[in-house]
Amino acid sequence: MAKLVNLQINQLPEVKIIGKAIYLKMDMKENPIPEFWKKCFEDGTFSKLEELKEYHIDSSYVGWMGDFGIDNGKFTYICGMLMKLGAPVPEGFIYRDIPSSKVAIGWIQGMEKDVYPVSHEFTQKAMEEKGYRLDESASWCMELYNCPRFTTPMDNGEIILDYYIPCETV
């Protein structure tokens, strides 16, 4: 069973998310995201992004969710990395510029398959208990696959996923 083991409220600097995207329905029956990650590893997406080392904000990979369409019921999911605003966007990649934002960062610990379904709910609940709410003007959230918290499982097989939600003081 997954659990929240840490919550931080930090200021995220202006960043650019660069990566490859898929466009998904909010009410999807099957989750294509794991297969999309596999494809991005196989097609050299991350190798290309790692070549931009001088632009990295963080060397961790991210799964960014945004462009939530109330009218069409779709959203964008980007597999990528956090870069400085001036980073060049390689051909065939997309980007989103993210303004400096106050963010709640929940550390969700558990077996990998168990952390994804609860990460948003657990992080949002904990930030609200600390006197913060969703920043409605920001309309995005993000998974950050921290090394080693996510990439090196504990002896029991559990990992920790960092989950970001833009927030503001109540």
Image (cartoon, rainbow, N blue to C red):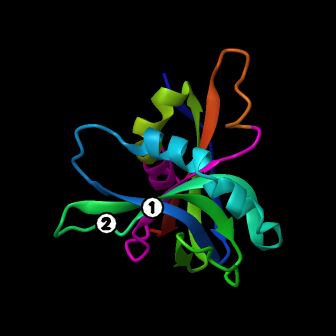
Q: Is residue 158 left or right of residue 140?
A: right
Between residue 56 and residue 128, name the one nearer to us: 56
Residue 10 coordinates in the image, percent (x, y): 66, 64
Residue 5 shown in magenta: no
Magenta range is 122-148
Q: Is residue 113 left or right of residue 61?
A: left
* Tags 2 and 1 touching, CB below 8 Å: no
Q: Is residue 43 left or right of residue 78?
A: right
10 Å crowding of disc 1: few (<14), some (14-19), many (20+): many
In the rendered image, which quarter contains the C terminus? Answer: bottom left
Q: Residue at x 54, y 69 (%)?
A: 93
**C-alpha distance separating marks 2 and 1:** 14 Å
Give the amino acid type for the residue marked by disc 1 in the picture.
Ala
Residue 128 shown in magenta: yes
Disc 2 is placed on an element classified as loop
Residue 150 coordinates in the image, percent (x, y): 67, 37
10 Å crowding of disc 2: few (<14), some (14-19), many (20+): some
Disc 1 is placed on an element classified as strand
Between residue 8 and residue 12, name the one nearer to us: 12
Q: Is residue 153 left or right of residue 126?
A: right
Label 2 sits on residue: 68
Label 1 sits on residue: 21
Q: How many marks?
A: 2
Which residue of the protein is positioned furthest toward the left in this rendering? Answer: 71
